[in-house]
Amino acid sequence: MSIADVDQRKFIDILGKVTAAEMHDNKPKKVEELLNEMIDYAWDNFKVEEAHMLESKYPDYKQHKEEHLGFVLRTLSYFKRVAEGDYQILNEIREYLNQWHINHIQRSEERRVGKE
């Protein structure tokens, strides 16, 4: 199994946890726990992916790195909202993660496979 496959499984696991929490455990502590998982995923995955892109001289590196920064900033904005008492945001987080999966992960995989 490739590193990309492991990272994608981690992401899908987080998405599943967000969906389950949205239905059963929409409490501030759970929302914060899920946001921490999103930050951990971003830190681990993006660092490795960006290093690989630099090494392979990936042509869209700058744009891709900006997308990663957008993910981190969005996640941090969710933390801020929870800290301000707005923790009924799991639906929004789930929708964002679904769009990230479609627009970033799948699109990146298509571009990578197309270049091999």
Image: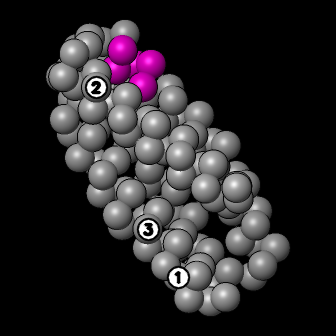
- Spatial CA distance of label 1 from label 3 is 9 Å
Mark before the other along the chain sequence, 3 or 2: 2
Locate residue 57, reporting x and y percent: 75, 82
Determine contact: label 1, label 3, CB under 8 Å.
no
Residue topped by disc 1: 111
Magenta residue check for 31: yes
Q: In the rendered image, is residue 84 in sight?
A: no
Magenta residue check for 28: no
| Nearer to us in this view, 61 or 108 | 108
- Spatial CA distance of label 3 from label 2 is 23 Å
- Left-right relation of 92 to 79: left
| Nearer to us in this view, 19 or 78 | 19
Quadrant including the C terminus: bottom right
Judge depth for marks 2 and 1 and give the one in front: 2
Residue topped by disc 3: 106
Label 2: how many residues lie within 10 Å, few (<14), some (14-19) or many (20+)?
few
Please state which amino acid type lies under the numbered disc 3: Gln
Please state which amino acid type lies under the numbered disc 2: Ala
- Left-right relation of 49 to 86: right
Residue topped by disc 2: 20
Q: Which residues are magenta?
A: 30-34
Identify the main secondary structure in magenta. helix
